[in-house]
């Protein structure tokens, strides 16, 4: 099984770096702010990707680019 965690929703999953994981897998984001993509492939090569949406999405003022723009404009 493979996992991919990201802070923003991803549409194109062809160029992401999948992390190979075994059960139990400890999430990198323990605050549950990330989107988690789970890719499972069986021995026959059949694959499936599922998305676990972030339970506590980041607010607009919690992102670094917001404060970067405020500092630059200020």
Image: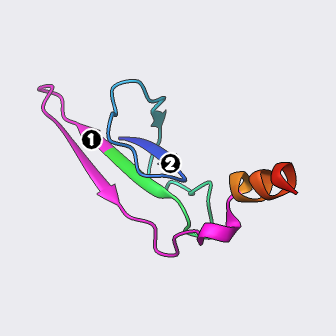
The reply to whether the magenta stretch includes residue 43 is: yes
Q: In the displayed structure, would residue 29 be above or below residue 38?
A: below
Foreground of the two, 35 or 1? 35
Residue 40 is marked as 1
Q: Residue furthest front?
A: 73
Q: Which residues are magenta?
A: 39-63
Write the residue at 55% across / 53% down.
7
Q: Residues within 10 Å of mark 1 (few under 14, many from 20)?
A: some
Looking at the picture, how far across and down is residue 28, in whole percent? Answer: 62, 54
Mark nearest the camera among 1 and 2 is 2
Report the quarter where the C terminus lies.
bottom right
Secondary structure of residue under mark 1: strand
Looking at the picture, how far across and down is residue 56, in whole percent? Answer: 52, 75
Q: Is residue 19 left or right of residue 74?
A: left
| Colour style of the rendered protein structure | rainbow
Task: Report which quarter residue 29 is drawn in.
Answer: bottom right
Write the residue at 56% across / 66% down.
33
Q: Is residue 25 left or right of residue 1?
A: right
Q: Which residue is mark 2?
A: 5
Foreground of the two, 6 or 8? 8
CA gap, disc 1 and disc 2: 15 Å
The reply to whether the magenta stretch includes residue 48 is: yes
């Amino acid at each position: 099984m493979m996992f991919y965690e990201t802070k923003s929703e991803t549409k194109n999953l062809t160029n992401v770096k999948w992390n190979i994981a075994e059960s139990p897998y400890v999430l990198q984001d323990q605050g549950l702010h990330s989107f988690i993509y789970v890719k499972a492939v069986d021995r026959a090569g059949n694959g499936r990707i599922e998305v676990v949406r972030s339970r506590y999405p980041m607010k607009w003022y919690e992102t670094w680019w917001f404060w970067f723009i405020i500092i630059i404009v200020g």
